[in-house]
Amino acid sequence: MQHPPISTPAQEGVVQAALGYLPANAPLPVQYTFPPPHGEPWENAGYDRRLMAVRDARTLARPPALARHGFALLDMPCEVCDVQDDNVIRRRCYPEVASLACQLTGGRRALVFDHLVRRRAPQRRVPLDFGRGRQAGAAPVNGRIHNDYTEASGRRRLALVLGDEAEREAVHHFCILNFWRPLMEPVLDAPLALCDARTVSAVDLVAGEVRYPHRTGDIYLMRHSPWHRWYFYSAMRRSEMLVFKQYDTRINGTSRFTPHCAFELPQGPASVPPRESIELRCLVILE
């Protein structure tokens, strides 16, 4: 069942949302995605929930651009494939996204290296949740501001995607993009908020560990700044795709990191279906 657009502050252009920043005095952040060893907490840093203005990007006179703001909305109608079958996703979605990534960036080659289907269980309304959902598929990272790659892990990704050393040495610059599409519509539960990359300073970003059962990754979390500007796209449809920059080796003239998180839409009806989405990560060789 589809739900019609609702009368919320989003229609006036801005909503107030509680977003999870890293406290200024936090230790090196460590968080687990599985039950931690005995005596250790799920996470050690705690989070500072700040009520932030999140503007509906649909109301802007000029739409955000990937190179400047770090994100953009694409009109990309498609027949959503069987997300239960990873092979179908790789065969049908990966080539389309790789081609699109080159068009958007001017890249000479693009390789989709990962995808993830996220589902939030009905009645799940945890304000700060780092994807520890126990239902099939990962849960949305709700309220926790993060960027999936740091300077270090972004560069490590090149070696993981391109196993041939000679190929890697020929790459001067590359970027990593995330392509995000809802699997239900409209998105009235846990929409995605994105921070304008131009308002993010390097001193705002703090590398933290995310521990998985068989590996440890590192991501950026973010300290609060009054300069941050947040946006979302109201009532997204399956025919729309959101693309945002996770990492770029270039240090001048383009966005590099786009901190983001899911959030609770204020004054939304209790009966909306839980959000389901698919995201594909793509490495783009620029030159």
Image (cartoon, grey):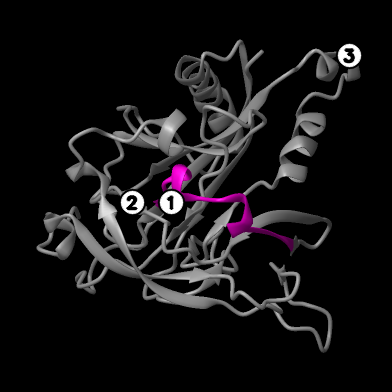
Determine whether label 2 and label 1 are within 8 Å by CB: yes
Residue designated by label 1: 195
Quarter holding residue 63: top left
Determine whether label 3 and label 1 are within 8 Å by CB: no
Mark toward the viewer: 3 or 2: 2
Residue designated by label 2: 231
Quarter holding residue 9: bottom left
For badge 2, the amino acid type reads: Tyr
The 10 Å Cα crowd at callout 1, few under 14, some 14 to 19, many 20 or more, is many
Image quadrant holding the C terminus, namely top right
Q: x and y percent of residue 132 in the render?
A: 60, 68
For badge 3, the amino acid type reads: Ala
Q: Is residue 61 left or right of residue 43?
A: left
Magenta region, residue range: 194-209
Label 1, secondary structure: give it: strand
Q: Label 3 to label 1, Cα distance in Å?
A: 36 Å
Q: Label 3 to label 2, Cα distance in Å?
A: 40 Å
Front residue of 84 and 7: 7
Q: x and y percent of residue 155 in the render?
A: 76, 36
Label 3, secondary structure: give it: helix
Front residue of 5 and 206: 206
Above or below, 165 against 158 in this view is: above
Label 2, secondary structure: give it: strand
Q: Residue at x 66, y 24 (%)?
A: 174
Residue designated by label 3: 166
Q: Residue at x 53, y 71 (%)?
A: 129
